[in-house]
Image: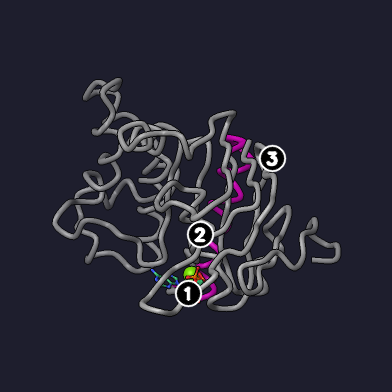
Amino acid sequence: MIIIENLKKIYRMGDVEVNALDGVTLDIAKGEFLGIMGASGSGKTTLLHMLGLLDEPTSGKITIDGVDVGRLNDYEKTQFRLYKLGYVFQDYALVPDLTVMENVSLPAMLRLDRTEEQTHAGSFEVLQKIGLCDRRDHLPRELSGGQQQRVSIARAMVNKPDILFADEPCANLDSENSRLVLDLFKEINEEFHQTIVMVSHEDWHKDYFHRIIRLKDGKIISDGSNGQSA
Ligand SMILES: Nc1ncnc2c1ncn2[C@@H]1O[C@H](COP(=O)(O)OP(=O)(O)O)[C@@H](O)[C@H]1O
Ligand SMILES: [Mg+2]
């Protein structure tokens, strides 16, 4: 599903060069729930941004579903993101002035192949899934952090993307809410066979992952199935 070949990302700031990714090669299978772990600054977010087409690598190649994404133009990339990819961020990134329902509907509204009824029905369905239908007319600030993160997961799910990317989605949550969020990912993964790539630096999260890769200084230092050497 995702093939990553010798991926490098160099950030240049004045005279200083940071090798944020230093030759990452990796295949991610369809339906895999992959955890990317490693210390702060090891390149986790950078890798996720490259895979999610949110930023471009300095060199190397990413193939998603047979498409060499480095060859897409900006318009094609936007379409690819809209139809195939979903994102969950650490800080939820909800639009503060829109209701829960409107936030969840946003990605669906951007698609030209959906009628208003389909958008509404689809948003309702994912809100049901996360158990927050009764909060649909509330604003994000009227919800707890855990509820906001579940709304952001619903938003990421509304277009039924093939791949869900999540960057430390539990970083601002207590362990009970973290568990709710992780259980939701697990359920989504099992029910829809959605590929999930999640960054985490909490050790106990690893029980949820099928496979864990660990990064250090922009390189993969271990890659293993859950319960094995990773
Ligand atoms: N936009 C940027 N400009 C310059 N350096 C960056 C930028 N983003 C990340 N870095 C650097 O790249 C390295 C990897 O960062 P990052 O991918 O955010 O790590 P992680 O998510 O594992 O904490 C770090 O040394 C960081 O300082
Ligand atoms: Mg990060």
Q: Position of residue 152 (x, y in %)?
A: 36, 53
Query: Please, what secondary structure does the residue beneath circle 3 have?
Result: loop
Q: Earlier in the sequence, mark 3 or mark 1?
A: 1
Above-or-below relation of 113 to 182: above
Question: Which quarter of the rendered picture does the N terminus lie within?
Answer: top right
48 part of magenta stretch? no
Give the residue pinned by disc 2: 181
Q: Is residue 31 above or below residue 87?
A: above
Q: How far apart in space, not on screen, are marks 3 and 1 (Cα)?
A: 32 Å
Q: Could you tell me which residue is drawn at 65 percent across and 47 percent down?
A: 5
Disc 2 element: helix
Q: Magenta span covers which residues?
A: 173-194
Looking at the rendered structure, which numbered label has been put on residue 159? Answer: none
Disc 3 Cβ-to-ligand 1 distance below 8 Å: no
Q: Residue at x 79, y 66 (%)?
A: 230
Q: How is the image coloured?
A: one colour
In terms of depth relative to the viewer, which is nearer, 224 or 128? 224
- Relative to 106, does residue 151 appear above or below in the rendering? below
- Residue 142 lies in quadrant: bottom left
Left or right of 137, for residue 59 = right
Q: Residue furthest left?
A: 97
Residue at 48% x, 40% y: name it.
70
* Image disc number at residue 29: 3
Of the residues shown, which amino acid type is indicated by label 2? Val
Q: Which numbered disc flags the more N-terminal residue, 1 or 2? A: 1
Q: Is 132 on the left or on the right of 176, as rendered?
A: left
Residue 40, horizontal then vertical, whole percent: 54, 78
- Per the model, the C-alpha gap separating discs 1 and 2 is 36 Å
User: Which residue sits furthest front?
Assistant: 15
Query: How packed is label 1: few (under 14 Cα within 10 Å), some, or many (20 or more)?
Result: few
Which residue corresponds to mark 1? 17
Type of the residue with mark 1: Glu
